[in-house]
Amino acid sequence: MDSRLDRLASMGIDVWRSRLKPPFGPQDATMPESPDLDIPVPPLNMDIIADWQELEAAVKDCCRCPLHETRTQTVFGVGDRTAQWMFIGEAPGEQEDLKGEPFVGRAGQLLDEMIKAIGLAREEVYIANVLKCRPPNNRDPAPVEATACESYLLSQVALVKPAIIVAVGRIAAQHLLKTTVAIGKLRGIVHDYRSIPLVVTYHPAYLLRSQTEKRRAWDDLKLARRTVRGQR
Ligand code: SF4
């Protein structure tokens, strides 16, 4: 059993364990199953690439799904590759596709502010998306695209080894947790993503439209910060 998650649970922090097996490290057959797992989990035949250069090259030339035909460029991920905090969004938008960097533009600036609020700079966390290529017209990622791209994200998580993952927005949260549960019900809980604590928060693009939810997003970040610190 993972000691960090056990410690959090023993301190009264709600930990929701999933049936997702870690792609790296020992698997725990005794891990209780999460009730939120309602999307079939793809078989764990993922090719984890344990080298940053190799991984970047694989993503850059990837043609695994039809999105390679419409992208300007792939959007790999940015930040500290040894960061404690990893933020994961859904997919590049128009500006990200043009710039080749996740979370730029107004939503990106708000994410930067959220990161700053927890005492960190953008360069001190790692930021990635579920998809590395932009879906046309910013539509939601199709399941087949998310599945095709999944091993790249798993490789990034395995390389960064974050102490906490923040799932940014409904799509990222539902994809990572393999669930269709509404984001409102996924918030406020520490989930177990392959033995790494995961907290769900709103997407900054949504927060730009719904200013009143900013307080809830701050609550999410405080929960994540307490989780990293191992505090209540
Ligand atoms: S979205 Fe992912 S799987 Fe699809 S082409 Fe881009 S990098 Fe490859």
Image (tube, rainbow, N blue to C red):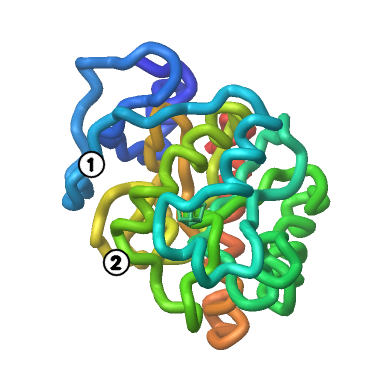
Residue 226: quarter of image: top right
Q: Residues within 10 Å of mark 1 (few under 14, many from 20)?
A: some
Please give the label number shown on residue 41: 1
Is 204 situated above or below 176?
below
Locate residue 105 relative to residue 72 in the image: left or right: right
**Mark 2 against mark 1, which lies toward the viewer?**
1
Task: Tell me the SS state at disc 1.
Answer: loop
Image position, residue 39 (x, y; %): 20, 51
Q: Which residue is drawn at 61% across and 27% down?
A: 159
**Residue nearest the viewer, comparing 116 with 138:** 138
Q: Quadrant of the N terminus?
A: top left
Pointer 2: what residue?
182
Q: Residue flagged by tag 1: what amino acid is it?
A: Val
Q: Residue at x 71, y 72 (%)?
A: 98
Task: Tell me the SS state at disc 2.
Answer: loop
Is residue 110 visible to us here?
Answer: no
